[in-house]
Image (cartoon, rainbow, N blue to C red):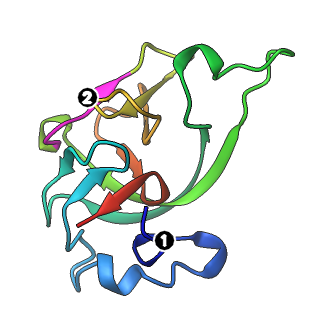
């Protein structure tokens, strides 16, 4: 990912103004970092700040560590989508407790986002796990 496209909560999301429109929606297309497949069209997701834990991006077999712990990051900057049919291209993992993780449907890299099965209208895509074009 080009560093100018990164959004980092630790730095106060310094590039947020380039990515979030005046009405709080994504001003650019959201695409997969690996293959460039479009995940969301401009204007289709709302910016949201919520602390969510996402496992590290790696092969499915490497998500859970030797001690049964999960390696990952707590991220706070997300695109919030309220209808799964809003996505251009996204896949879902099998249930992990009450959570399904979002992945790129084309190259299966992820997780790029998070969805709690208790809340049918909240799908979160981490800004740090995608690119914006």
Where is residue 26, by image quadrant? bottom left
* Label pair 2/1, CB-CB below 8 angstroms: no
The local secondary structure at tag 1 comes to loop
- Of all residues, the one furthest to the right in this rendering is 67
| Quadrant into which the C terminus falls | bottom left
**Magenta highlight range:** 87-92
Left or right position of 78 against 69: left
Q: Nearer the viewer, residue 120 or 2?
A: 2
Residue 105: image tag: 2
- Residue 57 magenta-highlighted: no
Where is residue 28, by image quadrant? bottom left
Identify which residue is drawn at 59% across, 71% down.
9
| Quadrant into which the N terminus falls | bottom left
Q: Nearer the viewer, residue 9 or 116?
A: 9
Q: Position of residue 54 (x, y in %)?
A: 58, 40
Q: Position of residue 88 (x, y in %)?
A: 13, 42
Q: Position of residue 60 (x, y in %)?
A: 53, 18
Left or right position of 88 against 100: left
User: What residue is pinned by disc 1?
Assistant: 7
Identify which residue is drawn at 46% across, 51% down.
129
Identify which residue is drawn at 28% across, 40% down.
121
Relative to 93, say whether 2 is above or below. below
- Residue 91 magenta-highlighted: yes
């Amino acid at each position: 990912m080009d560093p100018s496209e990164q959004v980092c909560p630790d730095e106060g999301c310094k590039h947020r103004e380039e990515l979030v429109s005046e009405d709080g929606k994504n001003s650019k297309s959201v695409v997969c970092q690996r293959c460039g497949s479009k995940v969301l069209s401009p204007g289709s997701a709302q910016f949201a700040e919520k602390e969510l834990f996402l496992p590290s991006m790696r092969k499915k077999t490497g998500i859970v560590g030797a001690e049964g712990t999960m390696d990952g990051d707590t991220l706070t900057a997300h695109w919030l989508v309220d209808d799964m049919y809003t996505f251009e291209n996204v896949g879902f993992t099998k249930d992990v407790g009450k959570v399904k993780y979002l992945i790129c449907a084309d190259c299966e890299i992820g997780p790029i986002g998070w969805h709690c099965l208790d809340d049918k209208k909240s799908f979160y895509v981490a800004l740090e796990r995608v690119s914006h074009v």
